[in-house]
Amino acid sequence: MSRYAHPAGPRHAEVLPEENPPSPPRDLARLDPRVWPATAGRGGADGELAVGGVGVRRLAAEYGTPLFVLDEEDFRRRARAYREAFSDAEADVYYAGKALLTKALVRWVHEEGLKLDVCSGGELTVALAGGMPPERIGMHGNNKSEAELARAVEAGVGRIIVDSFEEIERLERISAERGRVPKVLVRVTTGVEAHTHEFVATAHDDQKFGLALSTGAAAEAVRRVLACEHVELVGLHSHIGSQIFDTAGFEVAARRVTEFLTRVHRETGAELAELDLGGGLGIAYVSDDTPLEPEAIAKSLLSIVQRECDSHGLPMPRIAVEPGRALSGPAGITVYEVGTVKDVEGIRTYVSVDGGMSDNIRTALYGAEYTCALVSRAGGAEPVLSRLVGKHCESGDIIVHDLYLPSDVRPGDLVAVAATGAYCFSMASNYNHLPRPALVAVREGVPRTLVRRETEEDLLRLDVG
Ligand SMILES: Cc1ncc(COP(=O)(O)O)c(C=O)c1O
Ligand SMILES: N[C@@H](CCCC[NH3+])C(=O)O
C-alpha cells in the first residue's frame, strides 16, 4: 500500500529477485476507478485510454511525452465535495497550491468557492496572476523572507500563518512601516506522530515547522502576537503531515489545539475565532489504499472542536482545512513513451520511459507507490513482472518498483502512471537537463495547455555564462 511502507530512497536489496513478488492482476487492462481520474476509460477497438474525452495517442502526438494530463472535471468535483462537506459549518476550504499550481488552477479553485494556501513568493505571484482575491489567500512558510512578508502585507493577503518568533517581530515592523494590520494565525505543533513517511510528518516536536505546545513556545508566540500593535491574532493553525489515511491523528491534533484555544482564552481573555486544521488527507495511489472521504473527515473534525468548545463554554471557531493532494492528485496522470525494454533474465523486465525522477521524484524520495498501465492499447499478452524506470543517469531513477505489464510492451507504446496530479509537476526538476513536461487540461473532448513544455532553448536561456 502507498503508506510509505519502505524506507526513503532506493531499496538496495531489491536488485535481487523478490522472494514474494506481487501476484499478477486478473485483468491487466482494468483501470481501478479509485486510482484513475473520474473521466478515464478505455475505448475504441484496441482499448486506448481517454481522459476528459481525449485519447492519449492524440495527446502524445499533439503535446509530446512525457506529458502531465489533468482531468479538470475530476479536480472540480473533488473541490466541490470538500466545499460541500464543510458547508454546514462556518468553515473555509483552502486548496494547498504546493500540490500543483497554475493560473488556470487558481481560477478553478476560485470558481468552486475555495480559498488558496500559498507558501512562497512564487506561489503568491501565481495566485494573484490567476485572479485569486488577496483576502482569500493564506500565506504559509517557516522562513518567509522580508520581501515575501512585505508583498503579502502590501497585497492584503487574508491570513498570514506565523511560524517563528523572528517572524512575529519582522511582521510587526513590516506592517507598522506600511500602516497595515494583517490578520495572522499561529502555527502550533501538537506533538502528534502522524502515520506517514517521516519526511512529510509535521506535528512532532523535532522538526522545523510551527511552535510546540509541549515546550510552551506556542503559548509564548500567542502572547507576543497579542502584544503587537500591527498584527492581529485571529486564530491557530495545525497541520500534522501528508498522505494520511486514518482519522486518529487529525482527531488528536484537533482536540489538543482546541484545548490550547480554550487555555489561551482562560489565560489572556483572547477569544480566537479561527482554527485551521491543515491538509494531509491521503489518496489512493494503488488499489488497496483507502482514502478518507471528505464528509467523514468534516464530521469528525467539526464534532471534536464543537465538543471541546462546548465543554469550556466557548463559541465554536470558524474551521479551515487545506487539502492539496486530495484535490489535484487523483485528477492527474503522466503519459510516457516506452523507449527500451530490457529483460534482465531471471529477475524482471525493465521498461524505460522518456521521463523519470525529474518529473516524479516521489518514488525515490519517499518510496511512494504508483499504479501504471499500458494505455495506447489495452494489450492482451500475458503479464510480466516489470519495473518502470526513467532515463536519468541514476539507478534509483525508478518510477514504479513492481508492476505487471503485458509481455509484448514495446518501444513506442504509451504507458501512464495514475494519481500524479500532486507533487510531481510541482516538484519537477531539470536533472540531466531534461526539459520539464507540459501540463495539459482535458475536459469534454477538448485539451488545453496550462503550462507549455520546456525546450532546450529554455534551458539555455537562463545559462548566461
Ligand atoms: C501547512 C500545510 N497545509 C496544507 C498542506 C497540504 O497537504 P496535502 O497535500 O497533504 O493535503 C501542507 C503539506 O503537507 C502543509 O504543509
Ligand atoms: N511533497 C510531499 C508532501 C509534502 C507536503 C507539503 N508539506 C509528497 O509528495 O508527498
Image (cartoon, rainbow, N blue to C red):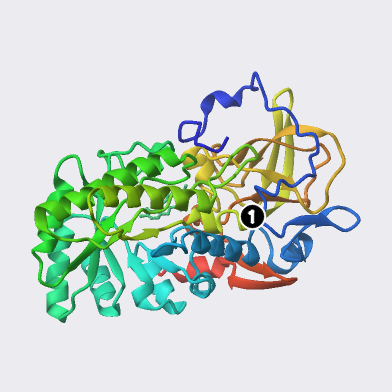
> Which residue is at 59% across, 45% downward?
284
User: On the rendered image, what quadrant is the C terminus found in?
Assistant: bottom left
- Residue 204 position within the rendered picture, expressed as x and y whole percent measured from the top left: 29, 39
Q: Is residue 206 left or right of residue 338?
A: left
Q: Quadrant of residue 404?
A: top right
Q: Which residue is mark 1?
A: 334
| Disc 1 Cβ-to-ligand 2 distance below 8 Å | no
Q: Residues within 10 Å of mark 1 (few under 14, many from 20)?
A: many
Q: Is residue 208 visible?
A: no
Q: Is residue 388 visible?
A: yes
> Which residue is at 46% across, 62% downward?
88
- Residue 314 position within the rendered picture, expressed as x and y whole percent measured from the top left: 24, 56
Q: Quadrant of residue 21?
A: top right
Q: Nearer the viewer, residue 464 or 402?
A: 402
Element at label 1: strand
Q: Is residue 391 left or right of residue 296?
A: right
Q: Nearer the viewer, residue 254 or 401?
A: 254
User: On the rendered image, what quadrant is the N terminus found in?
Assistant: top right
Q: Decide: is 16 above or below 270.
A: above
- Residue 164 position within the rendered picture, expressed as x and y whole percent measured from the top left: 19, 54
- Residue 83 position within the rendered picture, expressed as x and y whole percent measured from the top left: 50, 64
Q: Quadrant of residue 318?
A: bottom left
Q: Is residue 17 left or right of residue 7?
A: right
Amino acid type at circle 1 is: Thr
> Which residue is at 51% across, 48% downward?
296
